[in-house]
Image (cartoon, helix red, strand yellow):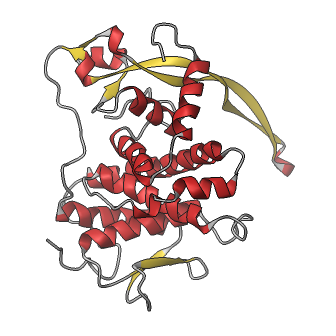
C-alpha cells in the first residue's frame, strides 16, 4: 500500500484484506493488544495501525505532538480512516409535549487521516501514559471495585460464592446477579468479573438472536472485552477461547465472515472503551479508602488519550 497517494478506498481494501487473513486466535489477540494501548481508536483503525506499524507504542496527530513540543517526520505517518460527519436534525414526537428536535452527527463517508508514533517524532522527552508491565494486587482490587460499581449501575448485584459446578462465574439475568466463584484469587476473580460485566453490557436473554446465534460469539465477545481491559492494566489472559474465531465467523455468515469479524471487533472495542474510561476514572480518583461496594472483599492474592481517535 503506497503511502503517498493513499485514498480512503485503499485503506478500506487494506482493512478488508487484513481481516480476511484472520485464522488463529493469536491474530485476534494481537489486535486486542493494540486496543489496550490505543482505546480511543475504532476497530478498523486499530487493524490499520497494527498493519502499518506493529511496534507502535503511542500514536497521536501532528497537532498533538506539536502541543507536546515535538516535531513529526511526515514520511513516517500511519494512515487511518477519519469519519466525515454532517449534522442532521432529528424530530421526535413527544406526544402532548409536541415535537422535540435534536441534532445528531451522521457519518457520510471517510477521509484519510495521519497519525504518528512517538518514534516518528523528534524533540524534548515526554512522559507518555502506558499500561503497567504487570497488574499490582492493589490495582486488581480497585479494578474489581470499579467494575462492581459499573455492574451495579446496570442494575446487577455481585454474589461471590460457590458456583455449584466447575465454572468460575456466570450471569443470572433473571435475578440480575453476577456470580463469581469464591475460590478464585484476586487476578482470576477480577478477570472473571470483567468477563461477566461484558455479558451484562453486550448480551441479554431477550436478544432476538439469542436462540439462533452461535454461543461462541457471546463467549468470544465477553472474553475479548475482558482481555482488552485487563491488558490495559498489565494482566495477560490466555487466548484459548479465540482459537476458533474464524470458524464461528463462517458459521454466522459463510459468504462474508470478514464482515462478522469487523462487526464483532467494533462491538468489543466500544464496550472495552466504556469500561476503560469508567474504571480509569475510578482508579485515578482520590486513593483514600472508599466505602465498600460489596459485602465480601476479594480473597488473598496469588503468586492521554488521542482525542482525534476516530470511532471507525
Instruction: Please indicate whether residue 251 sits to the left or right of residue 18 in the image.
Output: right
On the image, the x and y values in percent for residue 159 come to 41, 82
Q: From the viewer's perspective, is 236 left or right of 83?
A: left
- Residue 210, horizontal then vertical, whole percent: 69, 68
Of the pair 14 and 134, the residue shown nearer to us: 14
Visible residue check, residue 216: yes
The C terminus lies in quadrant: top right
**What's the residue at 58%, 43% (across, down)?**
262
* Rendered view: 77 above or below 298: above
Is residue 148 something that shows in the picture?
no
Residue extending furthest toward the bottom:
164
Q: Residue 288: x, y in percent?
A: 18, 60
Vertical placement of residue 144 versus 279, above or below: below
* Quarter where residue 164 is shown: bottom left
Label count reads 0
Residue depicted at 44% across the width and 65% down the height: 195
Residue drawn where x is 34% and y is 9% of the image: 74
Front residue of 25 and 8: 25
Q: Up-down: is 17 above or below 22?
A: above
Horizontal arrangement in the rendering, residue 215 relative to residue 47 (left or right): right
Residue 103 figure quarter: top right
Q: Residue 188: where, in percent of width, then height? A: 30, 71
Residue name at image x 24 percent, y 16 percent = 121
Amino acid at each position: 500500500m503506497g503511502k503517498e497517494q493513499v485514498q480512503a478506498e485503499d485503506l478500506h481494501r487494506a482493512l478488508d484484506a487484513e481481516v480476511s487473513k484472520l485464522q488463529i486466535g493469536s491474530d485476534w489477540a494481537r489486535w486486542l493488544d493494540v486496543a489496550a494501548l490505543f482505546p480511543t481508536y475504532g476497530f478498523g483503525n486499530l487493524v490499520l495501525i497494527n498493519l502499518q506499524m506493529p511496534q507502535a507504542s503511542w500514536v497521536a496527530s501532528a497537532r498533538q505532538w506539536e502541543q507536546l513540543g515535538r516535531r513529526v517526520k511526515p514520511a513516517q505517518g500511519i494512515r487511518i480512516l477519519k469519519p466525515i460527519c454532517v449534522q442532521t436534525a432529528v424530530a421526535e414526537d413527544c406526544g402532548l409535549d409536541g415535537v422535540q428536535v435534536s441534532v445528531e452527527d451522521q457519518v457520510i463517508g471517510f477521509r484519510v487521516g495521519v497519525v504518528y508514533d512517538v518514534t516518528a517524532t523528534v524533540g524534548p522527552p515526554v512522559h507518555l501514559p502506558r499500561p503497567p508491565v504487570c497488574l499490582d494486587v492493589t490495582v486488581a482490587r480497585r479494578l474489581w471495585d470499579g467494575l462492581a460499581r459499573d455492574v451495579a449501575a446496570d442494575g446487577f448485584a455481585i454474589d461471590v460464592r460457590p458456583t455449584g459446578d466447575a465454572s468460575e462465574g456466570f450471569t443470572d439475568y433473571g435475578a440480575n446477579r453476577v456470580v463469581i466463584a469464591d475460590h478464585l484469587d484476586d487476578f482470576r476473580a477480577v478477570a472473571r468479573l470483567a468477563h461477566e460485566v461484558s455479558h451484562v453490557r453486550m448480551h441479554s436473554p431477550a436478544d432476538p438472536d439469542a436462540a439462533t446465534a452461535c454461543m461462541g460469539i457471546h463467549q468470544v465477545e465477553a472474553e475479548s472485552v475482558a482481555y482488552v481491559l485487563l491488558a490495559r492494566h498489565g494482566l495477560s489472559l490466555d487466548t484459548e477461547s479465540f482459537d476458533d474465531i474464524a470458524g464461528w465467523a463462517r458459521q454466522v455468515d459463510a459468504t462474508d465472515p470478514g464482515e462478522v469479524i469487523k462487526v464483532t471487533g467494533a462491538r468489543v472495542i466500544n464496550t472495552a472503551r466504556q469500561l476503560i474510561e469508567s474504571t480509569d476514572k475510578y482508579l485515578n480518583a482520590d486513593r483514600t479508602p472508599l466505602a465498600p461496594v460489596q459485602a465480601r472483599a476479594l480473597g488473598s492474592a496469588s503468586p492521554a488519550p488521542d482525542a482525534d481517535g476516530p470511532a471507525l
